Every structure is written in C-alpha cells, then in structure tokens.
Image (spheres, coloured by chain):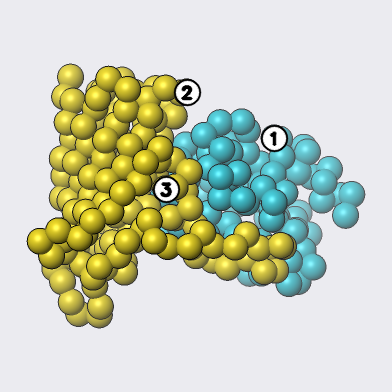
Amino acid sequence: MAHRFALTVEGDLAALGRAQRALERWVEAAELAPRPAYRAQLVFEEIATNVLKYGWGEGEGPRAVAVEIELEPEALRMAFRDRGRPFDPTAEPEPERPASIADATAGGLGLGLVRKAAAELAYRREGGENVTELRIPLAGA
Amino acid sequence: MEIQIDSSAAELRRVKLVGRLDSAGAGAVETKFNAATAGAGVDSIADLSGVTFIASLGIRMLVTAARTLAAKEKKLVLVVGEGLVAETLRDGGIDQLVPMVATAAEAEALLASG
C-alpha cells in the first residue's frame, strides 16, 4: 500500500474533479478510517479550489497547485505548493458567524472547514511559492 | 452527482441529491437546484441522505437557495442523517442557519408547522 500521494492539479475546477477521484482511490487503498479519509479530501478540495480560483489574476498563470500527502503512524501530513499570489491562511481572521440566514454570505466557508479538519496549519513563502502544511490526526476516527 | 426533483405538490419541492457535492458536483447541479427551489419560490426539502461528501461550494449552493427562499418568506429544510456530511455542515455553522432533520417526514412536519 502506498504511503505517499503526490499530484499536481493544473488548470481549472474540472481538473480538480479528476484529482479528487485519484485522491479518493488513494485513501481507499490506504484503508484510512472514514473521518481522516473524508478530511483529507475536504482539505484538498478547499485549498486547491482557493488556489485555482483566487491565486492568479485574470489571464495570469499557469494555474497549478501541487499536493503531497504522507501517511505517518498517527497522522496524515499534507503539503500544498503553488506559485500564485502570496496567501497566508493562518493570518486570515475567522469570519463572523451570521446571526440568521438573511445575513449569511455565500462564500468564506472553506478556510473555516480546513481549520476544523486540521490539527496544525502552517504557512511560509519559499522561493516564490506559497507552502501550506497541515496535519490530520488518524485517531478519533 | 445526480439530482431528482419532485414537483408533484404545488407548494412544495422535494429535491434529492445523490453523490459528491464538491466543486464538480455543485457545478453540475447548481442551476437545476436553484431553479427547483429558490426559483420556484416555494417551501423546499433538500434530501442529502444520498450525499457522500460535501465541501464549501456545495454548502454555498444550499445557503444561497435558503437565503433567497427566506427573502420570500419560504423555507429550505435539509434532510441529512448522522455522519460526516452532517458533521461538515455543523462545522460550517449551517445547522444554525438552515433547519436540519433526519428524515423527509420530519422535514414535511416542520414545514407544516410553519
């Protein structure tokens, strides 16, 4: 069973869909418990979506985000790299929870879901790349 | 991602979603979902019991429809059993904004009670 998953998503959200199928097959082959398997796919979806949608301005690119996942005894370690505009997810303020559905905004949920799913979230800018790393515990599944 | 729309009742839409409600899934059904719920402007039930995965773009689709319906004094009720999809909706605070129940019968009772 492979302990490492690595893939680069290039282009748009259609490419992300294909990458998700590949990750889905990997978490099945790795026989992960349901919760970490789900969280790995959720974090991948949210971070990759954010990078591909907002990492570059109109007409800029190429748009690409690379992910590496290492299966360790107690956790999944995930690392994302992209050459888009600098974005530090650890510096983003927690969005205010709306008081009612009338006050709800359509966006801004993704980063909150990543924070809930990840035990650790770290960011650095390195060699012109955003490097976002996090850890998903295997316990408590 | 599959979407099944039951429009047999004039004042109620029952919409069942099956599959992964991720960016690709939401993109595939969003137009039909919005037309069937917010566009119709009637109380609506979104049955998510067949949804195996949900991410923020899928949640956004549900919140947008619920907000539009609320502006028309109508409701969207989500049917979602216990599991990781329900956990994700709670993590996003959606259970505080949109009613979540376990069965379609509970959803209909909730809408009937006003």
Give the CA separation, mark 1 to mark 3. 26 Å
Q: Residue A89: x, y in percent?
A: 36, 58
**B108 or A73: nearer the viewer:** A73
Q: Residue B109: x, y in percent?
A: 84, 43
Q: Residues within 10 Å of mark 2 (few under 14, many from 20)?
A: few
Q: Amino acid at mark 1?
A: Ala
Please give the name of the residue rendered at 38% of the width and 29% of the height, measured from the top-left corner. Answer: A137
Q: Residue B43: x, y in percent?
A: 75, 58
Give the CA separation, mark 2 to mark 3. 17 Å
Circle number at residue A140 = 2
Give the CA separation, mark 2 to mark 1. 24 Å
Please give the name of the residue rendered at 82% of the width and 46% of the height, measured from the top-left corner. Answer: B110
**A50 or B70: nearer the viewer:** A50
Q: Is residue A99 visible?
A: yes
Quarter of the image with the N terminus of chain A is top left
Q: Residues within 10 Å of mark 1 (few under 14, many from 20)?
A: some
Report the residue marked by disc 3.
A114
Report the residue marked by disc 1.
B102
Q: Residues within 10 Å of mark 3 (few under 14, many from 20)?
A: many
Of callouts 2 and 3, the N-terminal one: 3
Dot 1 falls on which chain? B
Q: Amino acid at mark 2?
A: Gly
Q: Which chain is yellow?
A: A
